[in-house]
Image: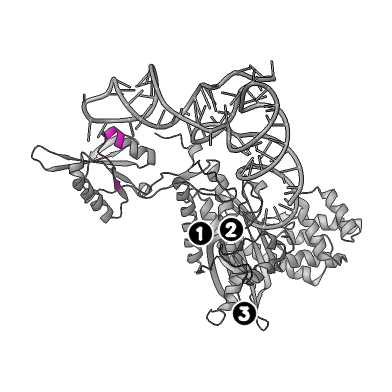
Amino acid sequence: MSKPTPLSGFPELLPAQRVVEQLVVDTLRRTFELHGFAGIETRAVEPMDQLLRKGDTSKEVYVLRRLQADDAGSDAGIGLHFDLTVPFARYVLENAGKLEFPFRRYQIQKVWRGERPQDGRYREFTQADIDVIGRDTLPFHHDVEVTKVMLDALRRLAHPDVIGLPGFRLQVNNRKLIQGFYLGLGLSDVDEVMRLVDKLDKLPAEKVAELLVAEAGATPAQAEACLRLATIRTDDDSFVDQVRALGVSHELLDEGLEELATLVRGAAPLADEHVRITADLSIARGLDYYTGTVFETRLDGYESMGSICSGGRYDALASDGRTTYPGVGISLGVSRVLVPLLSRGVLTGSRSVPSVVLVALTDEASRPASDAVADALRARGIACEVAPTAAKFGKQIKHADRRGIPFVWFVGTDEQGAPTHQVKDIRDGNQVDADPAAWTPSTDDLRPQVVSPTTEETSS
RNA sequence: GUGGGUAUAGCUCAGCUGGUAGAGCGCCGCCUUGUGGUGGCGGAUGUCGCGGGUUCGAGUCCCGUUACUCACCCCA
């Protein structure tokens, strides 16, 4: 059988890379829980009618069918979920009687989209979502809360002592603001205007202005005003004055300005040198179901990859006809952030196995002695393994080195026949006597860490 | 779904207008008779994506096909 080739869009990681992904997921989970969000997992499949509610994405759904299913029978029609919001909405309706509202949950799972893969775009990938959902109403301060939680998570991911990812820029806008602005200008087709303005990062401003006139019924002056609004971006609430200076007034605009200003003021204290938040009035987010706050996030140095973390406020994502459940949430593309960095070799794990120590093996007969050392270390929470064969010590050291295991433990015997123990740090060659019941590695060495191979050549 | 590019060793790639395959890195062994990394010497490895055609002869030319990849659409 010939060697299998990779399946495009279904990324798989090597063990050392997986270390990074798990550290990222651990960090996200810890942060979300620190903010009191409950974790849930939903099934991988949803009925097709649920999945198709989102409209355009329907073509991307992977439909599930049993190989042996008889075509005659009408199949129930289920497909793999393509995001975590639709399953969550369904979960909320299904369990509404058992949940407490406002319900705050996080969810980190695989999702599937039948798109054409590209750098940072996959057909199977991991998303990390947080949402807050209310019954009938959901106060605006939850928009601020969700922003702060994700900002906190991103800050940890970018912190050099945690994961050390490149920096992030969280861009926030508010649909009420832009819709109110367009209405105040006298434009009627606000959705179309929004859709066209959203193309600003792809098309030049003049082109968008032409489209606004041609397709959205705007006058050149109105188009100009729309573009002026979209150029406003500030890291504090000073955008309010800039918008006011454009001389447009509308009730919805005021509401949006107030909300966005509140959000930026509330979240700004969490920003640092790695993670910034900016009010960016060009962000609109396609059409979708967003009704207020909208988010996008760029990864520093990878701006062309698009948004890696998006979301917003939706006033009616879930409804059972009687009760409406408004929500606000953000979704982080774990795979989108990580896979390009891992495949380019920007980041990887410090080792391909959890082991801190390789216990060397003198000969097969003494395997029990080596096993005993390993068990003594494990009893104290130190991950380790025993050498697979009693090869020359040089080979056993190489075995450890290949896997990034920092220590090799040698078990010997003194003249009186008593066991002797030495542990060698193979990075600096330092070898010292050690007691299996007491020796402890540094906390940095205890677990695999994230390293940047390109900048790592400084030590040793 | 639309359009372009690519497919040769484990990896990155070379192979000029057709003459039955090569480099670097990696891997294995020895120098080094039980403590790796550097250095020296030696060694192994390919259905040249798959199928067909042209030809005395195809990695090379032609057709088809599959996969990968980039851009568009859309999005995490």
The magenta span reads: A385-396
Circles 1 and 2: CB distance less than 8 Å? yes
Mark carried by residue A28: 1
Tag shown at residue A332: 2
Q: Which amino acid does label 2 sit on?
A: Leu
**Magenta run includes residue A428:** no
Which mark is on residue A135?
A: 3
The answer to whether residue A443 is left or right of residue A295 is left
Amino acid at the residue labelled 3? Arg
Identify the mark nearer the N-term, 1 or 2: 1
Residue A294's spot in the image, x, y percent? 68, 63
Q: Is mark 2 on a helix, strand or loop?
A: strand
Q: How far apart are marks 3 and 1 (CA)?
A: 26 Å
Image spot of residue A233 (x, y percent): 72, 55
In the foreground, A400 or A168: A400
Mark 2 to mark 3: distance in Å? Answer: 25 Å
Query: As shown in the figure, which amino acid type bears the numbered disc 1?
Result: Leu
Give neighbour class at mark 1: few <14, some 14-19, many 20+ (Cα, 10 Å).
many
